[in-house]
Image (spheres, rainbow, N blue to C red):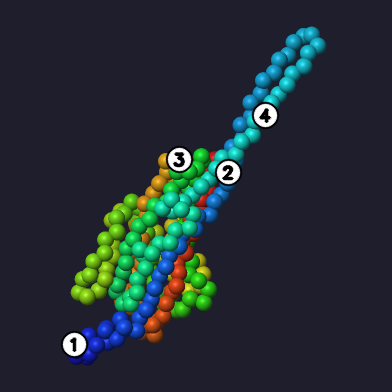
Amino acid sequence: MQRDDVVDRIASFRRSTHSFFTVRVRALLALGTILALGTVGTFAAWANSAVATGTFSTGTVDLRANDTKSFTFSALGMTGMLPGESQAASLQVQNTRSTMDVTYTVNVTTPAGSPVLANNIQLRVFSGGTPSNATTGGLRTGSCTGTQIGQTTLAAGSAAPIVTSPRPLAASTGTETLCMVVTLPTTTPLPTQNQSVPALVFTFAAQTTV
């Protein structure tokens, strides 16, 4: 195949590809309970009475992403995506409004009816990373610093686990920055062009540790 033919084919693929990702974050909360029981009483050899009192209180769990319950992760979106391209963006998971320590896991879901394009999209997650996006050889590329803590290939119309080992967040002060890279592999088949995945939904499931 001549070089001009290759260039024309890539340009045609870019014009006909209109993939768009709008990513929302949902925080699922697990409410834990702290039980505090205090007793006071007296006892004597003479006739008397004793009273015991108990106090019950509940703790609170309020997990957030970028300080909101439902965060639109638009920085991770791409249009006209070509095989080999990627995009990076970050968000912060916060347990600062909670009174209890938690751990959390993450999965990512594509909407029902998503096209087969979704089955080719790869996602990586890094802890404490900073996103970087550039253009190299005409292709957009994204990367993250930090430590990789998860990787998955999306599934059309269903959920895929991305962070499976529980991540700890302390009460009141716990935060973690997650950097994510979404990639369309070079092996993505030609029939996926002109397809769109309208939303990736990241679900953060929190569990108390007491």
Amino acid type, mark 2: Gly
Residue at position x 74%, y 18% from top?
50
Q: Nearer the viewer, residue 112 or 66?
A: 66
Above or below, 201 against 15 in this view is: above
Above or below, 69 against 194 in this view is: above
**How far is disc 3 from disc 2 in space, using C-alphas?**
15 Å
Locate the C terminus and report the quarter of the image it occupies: top right
Q: Residues within 10 Å of mark 1 (few under 14, many from 20)?
A: few
Residue 121 occupies which quadrant of the picture? bottom left
User: Considering only order in the chain, which callout, 2 or 1, is on the residue closer to the N terminus?
Assistant: 1
Q: Are marks 4 and 2 in contact (CB under 8 Å)?
A: no
Above or below, 198 against 28 in this view is: below
User: Considering only order in the chain, which callout, 2 or 3, is on the residue closer to the N terminus?
Assistant: 2
Residue 54: image tag: 4
- Residue with the mark numbered 2: 32
Residue at position x 30%, y 72% from top?
85
Q: Is residue 109 left or right of residue 39?
A: left
Q: Are marks 1 and 2 in contact (CB under 8 Å)?
A: no
Give how far across and how far down residue 22 sits, in percent.
42, 68
- Residue with the mark numbered 1: 3
- Residue with the mark numbered 3: 172
